[in-house]
Image (cartoon, helix red, strand yellow):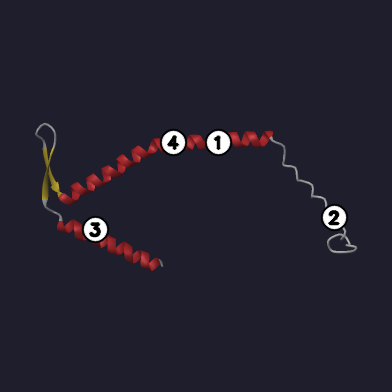
Amino acid sequence: MQALAWILRLLVLLLIVWFATKNTDLVRINGLLEQSWQAPLVFVLLIAFVAGIVIGLLAWVPTVVRQRRDIGRLRKTAARLAAIQPPPVTPEPPPPVVEAPERTVRGDAHGI
């Protein structure tokens, strides 16, 4: 199974290298105030990809911080409640069930 994973990784790497060699044309990036920048297309795509990852992680950080704060607060509350509550009492077993004795029917089945 591990050999299959390494083969898949090698194929992805070869695909990325092939993509990079096919897209070496220069592209012009126009910025503010009549600024322009020329770079290979692969480099521009890589920068855009990395910038997207960084922006996504920065948007995710406040959620993680809030969740960690909530988890800490809940752990403290659980510890406080565990210290206050007495240990659970084991219930007594139920009394044994006593069956009624069988009744004998005298006479007719209809009670006559």
The residues tagged by marks 2 and 3 sit, at their Cα atoms, a distance apart of 79 Å
Name the residue tied to disc 1: 74
Q: Quadrant of the N terminus?
A: bottom left
The quadrant of the picture occupied by the C terminus is bottom right
Would residue 66 be found to the left or right of residue 51 on screen? right
Instruction: Say few, some or many: other residues with alpha carbon within 10 Å of mark 3 (under 14 / 14 to 19 / 20 or more).
Output: few
In the image, 73 versus 12, the foreground residue is 73
Q: What amino acid does circle 1 point to?
A: Leu
Mark 4 Cα within 10 Å, few/some/many (few <14, many 20+)? few
Circle 3 sits in a helix, a strand or a loop, which is it? helix
* Residue at the spot of label 4: 65
From the image, tell me which residue sits under label 2. Answer: 98
Q: Quadrant of residue 61?
A: top left
Please give the residue where the numbered disc 3 appears in the rendered image: 16
Specify the amino acid type for callout 2: Val
| 67 on left or right of 77 | left
